[in-house]
Amino acid sequence: MNDERPDSNPRSHSLDERFAKDPWMRERVHQIADMRDEMIARGCTLDEVEEKVLEQIRWLGQELLTGIAREKSAAITDQALQKHPGASRDSKKK
């Protein structure tokens, strides 16, 4: 049984709608597609194109996961600061 709200399901929105909310990701996907097209136009083999595209997609995945981790870390820090207003976000070790 699926208890999720329909609007919380990413598939309820088109890819264009989702990219509109994330212009950075839209641009990176365009860059990868452009690179692929340029490599094919230069006469690179499909194996070379595949290798380069997969490399770029791995980097994209790492960038996306790093961004998510930073957002979660910031949210947790903000919650802690709200609970403990006297706490410091950054402190030096003694």
Image (spheres, grey):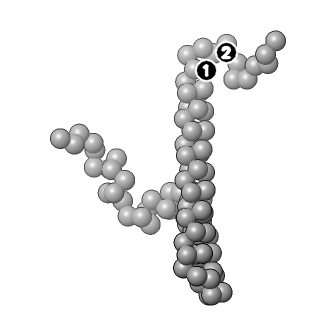
Label disc, if present, on residue 87 of the rendered structure = 2
Q: Residue at x 79, y 16 (%)?
A: 93
Residue at horizontal 55 percent and vertical 43 percent from the top: 68
Quarter of the image for residue 90 reads top right
Q: How crowded is the residue under tag 2: few (<14 C-alpha within 10 Å), some, or many (20+)?
A: few
Quadrant of res 30: bottom right
Q: CA distance from mark 2 to mark 1?
A: 6 Å
Please tell me whether residue 66 is drawn above or below residue 20 in the rendered image.
above
Looking at numbered disc 2 in the image, what kind of residue is underneath it?
Ala
In the picture provided, is 33 more to the left or to the right than 1?
right
Determine whether label 2 and label 1 are within 8 Å by CB. yes
Vertical relation: 1 (above or below) 32: above
* Residue at image point 56% right, 57% down: 58
Q: Position of residue 52 (x, y in %)?
A: 61, 69
Please report the residue visible at 54 percent of the width from the left and 79 percent of the height from the top: 46
Q: Which residue is mark 1?
A: 81
The amino acid type, in three-letter code, at marker 1 is Leu
Residue placed most toward the observer, 39 or 75: 39
Q: Residue placed farthest to the left in the image? A: 1
Identify which residue, 40 or 91, lies in the foreground.
Answer: 40
Judging depth in this view, the residue of 48 and 11 nearest the camera is: 48
41 w.r.t. 29: above or below? below
Classify 10 Å Cα crowding around label 1: few (below 14), some (14-19), many (20 and above). Answer: some
